[in-house]
Amino acid sequence: MKSYEVNFDGLVGPTHNYGGLSYGNVASQSNSQQFSNPREAALQGLAKMKALMEMGFTQGVLAPQERPDVAALRSLGFSGSDAQVIQQAAKDAMPLLVASCSASSMWVANAATVSPSADTADGRVHFTAANLNCKYHRSIEHPTTTRVLKAMFADQRHFAHHAALPAVAQFGDEGAANHTRFCHDYGQAGVEFFVFGRSAFDTRYPAPQKYPARQTLEASQAVARLHGLSEDGVVFAQQNPAVIDQGVFHNDVIAVGNGELLFYHEDAFLNTEHMLAEIHDKLGRRGGRFRAICVPRAEVAVEDAVRSYLFNSQLLSRADGSMLLIVPEECRGNERVWQYLQRLIADDGPITEVKVFDLKQSMQNGGGPACLRLRVALNETELAAVNPGVIMTAPLYDTLTQWVEKHYRDRMSETDLTDPGLLLECRAALDELTKILKLGSVYPFQIN
Ligand code: SUG
């Protein structure tokens, strides 16, 4: 049976803004308080989805969340009507209002960890929503994420959904941003590669000194257990704490893998040789031939990787076996990175083409092409069981573009977030969206 890797991209929500909320994420911190353009952000994301669809890849879309999150503000003690809750928070606790308005659910690489049916004990595709508990504004995403994923992957014969891990730092989980999968073919058993930033319980593992390590070893192990992965189908590796301190807040800022290939920076991991050998052996036992492309620090410094988001690229397999790299415009703007990419595709290696996308609105908050997509490997039967409303088509692209143009503002500042009218605008937009994507009722305002 044929299998596919489907990219489900996060649709940018109507409150996209630069809140400076992510300590350790250099772009989020340095663009704090700038004006954002939610309409442009959503259109840039849709343009990428359309381009991939037109290249022949199956492309899906993942809905944004209800923001401002009035329920979250109520749980923090604000009360009265919805408008009063927003006004009170604006007056007494602006950082909490900003957090409750973040459109951060757009970075769906952090929505969940997904294991394809070929890897799991019960032969179903498993999803665990990420608790994202390192940052308050992200920790409020997972209940709606779970509802949206269940509305997209509803058939329990094929899909299993797990609640987020316990919401404590010891089980900090950032989803697929620290997870990749190697395989010979998407439909065959593969090797799931979990990268953690620290151990919560074992002091032998070093930890970063400056910025937080968001993913723990124990969280990754728990997800592997929940998904029923076998020991010979998983590899756990530690991210180099020194690069976390340079702004590599997720592994997908310093490495990307697909099929039999890992594309990574020389400084990305600890014990790299051991890790590569383990992946090589385990993938070999599953019929795959592991290959790795290491980008030397002498050619691209970690700082350039963080600025350009070279590794936050999408590595896509073509029918002829070659690979395509989808990179953000910032890679072209960085001379060393761009020259490296020219050499890479001129080489006789598996990556034969680079395509550039303008995702500046998302990039300014630290989200590149890879952050904006959740990969789900599906066989034909499973793909047929996915809610068809969320699969991108030319008419759906047109409808979503019109929907964005109708509902989204083209300028957003912190002051705009204090406007209670924004909540009504967002709810009207999302109510219409659930009908367009055939999701049913998934948002708190639709349920309560
Ligand atoms: O969690 N930025 C996100 C970016 C996530 C990128 N995802 C991956 N690398 N997979 C984060 O730090 C910034 C929001 C603000 O500052 O307004 C933010 O949440």
Image (tube, grey):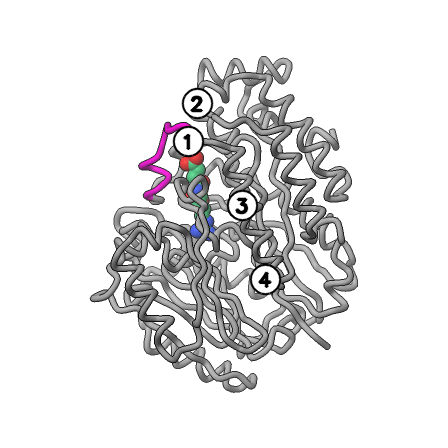
User: For the residues marked 2 and 4, what is the alpha-carbon distance in whole angstroms?
Assistant: 38 Å
Location of the N terminus by quadrant is: bottom right
The answer to the question of whether label 1 and label 2 lie on touching residues, with beta carbons closer than 8 A, is yes
User: For the residues marked 4 and 1, what is the alpha-carbon distance in whole angstroms?
Assistant: 35 Å
In the displayed structure, 150 sits above or below 405; it is: below
Residue placed at 69% from the left, 52% from the top?
Answer: 393
**Which one is in front, 78 or 306?**
306
Which residue matches tag 2? 414
Label 1 neighbourhood size at 10 Å, few (<14), some (14-19), many (20+)? Answer: many
Residue labelled 1 has its Cβ within 8 Å of some atom of ligand 1: yes
Highlighted range, magenta:
26-35
Residue placed at 73% from the left, 63% from the top?
Answer: 383
Residue placed at 76% from the left, 38% from the top?
Answer: 435
**Which one is in front, 97 or 292?**
292
**Which amino acid type corresponds to the residue marked 3 in the rendered image?**
Gly
For discs 2 and 4, the disc positioned in front in the rendered view: 4
Which residue matches tag 3? 45
Is 160 left or right of 287, judged from the image as shown? right
Which residue matches tag 1? 19
Q: Which mark is residue 387?
A: none
Which residue matches tag 4? 55
> Which of the 4 quarters of the picture holds residue 252?
bottom left
**Which amino acid type corresponds to the residue marked 2 in the rendered image?**
Glu
Residue placed at 49% from the left, 77% from the top?
Answer: 260
**Which amino acid type corresponds to the residue marked 4 in the rendered image?**
Met
